[in-house]
Amino acid sequence: MSDAPPHHSHYSPVIGEAKGYDLIGDVHGCAQSLERLLQQLGYQKVSGVYRHRDRQAIFLGDIVDRGPRIREALHLVRDMVEQGSAQMILGNHEFNAVVYSTPSTVPGEYLRPHTPANIRQISETLEQFVKYSQEWQEFLRWFVELPLFLEIQHPVTRQVFRAVHACWDQQLINQHRAHYGDGHIDWQFIHRSAQKGSLEAITKQRLTGGIDLPLPDGETMVSSDGYVRRAFRTKFWGHEAQTYGQLLFQPDPIPDYIAKAEISPAHRTQMVHYDQSQPPLFVGHYWLKGQPRPLAPNLACLDYSAVKYGRLVAYRMDGEAQLQPDKFVWVYVDP
Ligand SMILES: [Mn+2]
């Protein structure tokens, strides 16, 4: 795709005259930290909406759930999108909120089952919208208008870059575009995504959730956020991993004997390779820790666990082909 012609029809139209883009990782209800970050990036509130003279923010999804000011964060972001000073892609948490709230054809049931784990994931959001149910319904409808991924060509350098919440899988993206034209979804996608094994279910899971491999022999582990996990998150870039430990990409370690095992041929076929000839890609999702830096010359994850008192992180994209460590900007989130 890096040698795609400049008038590629998949590129999202440039809104206004953005000379640069500020990609922002998972907010999860940290609205105050988001305001501090936007101010640090030079955005100013004009008529109640943050905007920048010549830059546009791109939110990588997961505005909702977990944090203290979800409603405020949603208003801030949607206002920016509606005014053209931001774009946003769907995170797994927004998508899950939609399917959690959408009745299935079975009376009393929903597209996403109301299991204890699923109830817990959305509980802060629903609590904070208890008195604003009309507003919440409007946000749910707005989520369905958002794309799963963006591919943007920088107006000056002509460099293409990409944004997806968790994993860029070119094959699934090509299939999605063949059906839907671009990265957008619709209510039919929402309903189909609830059918196990459907293209929509696979696309949603892969693009907003990344690649999970199951722990062997039905083993489980408890992650640091208190969930029982039957699978672990893996890298989708680079070809060099031989063992599961080298493929692992999550804060919690896996049992040592699994980490040292060779990746099975069956699991190898599930892997996606985002190699270094591809355009720069920005993801959120993986709640990293420590000093923000590129994961590869063409890959940055901007989720540094803001809601767990980590950092809310942005990358200032000016159309460069190689991502630079000094272009990450962040605020610390205080307890
Ligand atoms: Mn997240």
Image (cartoon, rainbow, N blue to C red):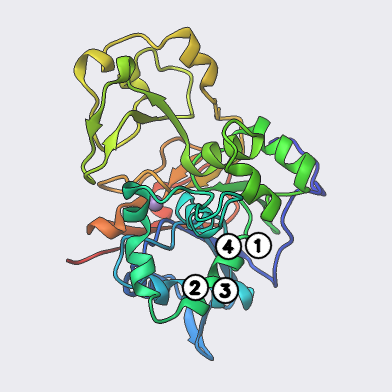
Task: Give the distance between the C-alpha atoms of the residues marked 3 and 2, in whole angstroms.
Answer: 5 Å
Residue at 80% x, 46% y: name it: 8
Residue at 60% x, 33% y: name it: 169
Image quarter of the N terminus = top right
Q: Position of residue 110 (x, y in %)?
A: 51, 52
**In the rendered view, would you say 142 is above or below 48?**
above
**Residue 140, quarter of the rendered image:** bottom right
Residue 136, which numbered label?
A: 2
Q: Residues within 10 Å of mark 2 (few under 14, many from 20)?
A: some
Task: Give the distance between the C-alpha atoms of the residues marked 1 and 4, in whole angstroms.
Answer: 5 Å
Q: Position of residue 54 (x, y in %)?
A: 60, 73
Which residue in the structure is indicated by mark 4?
A: 143
Residue 145, which numbered label?
A: 1
Is there CB contact under 8 Å for labels 3 and 4? Answer: no
Which residue in the structure is indicated by mark 3?
A: 138
Circle 4 SS class: helix
Task: Give the distance between the C-alpha atoms of the residues marked 1 and 3, in whole angstroms.
Answer: 11 Å
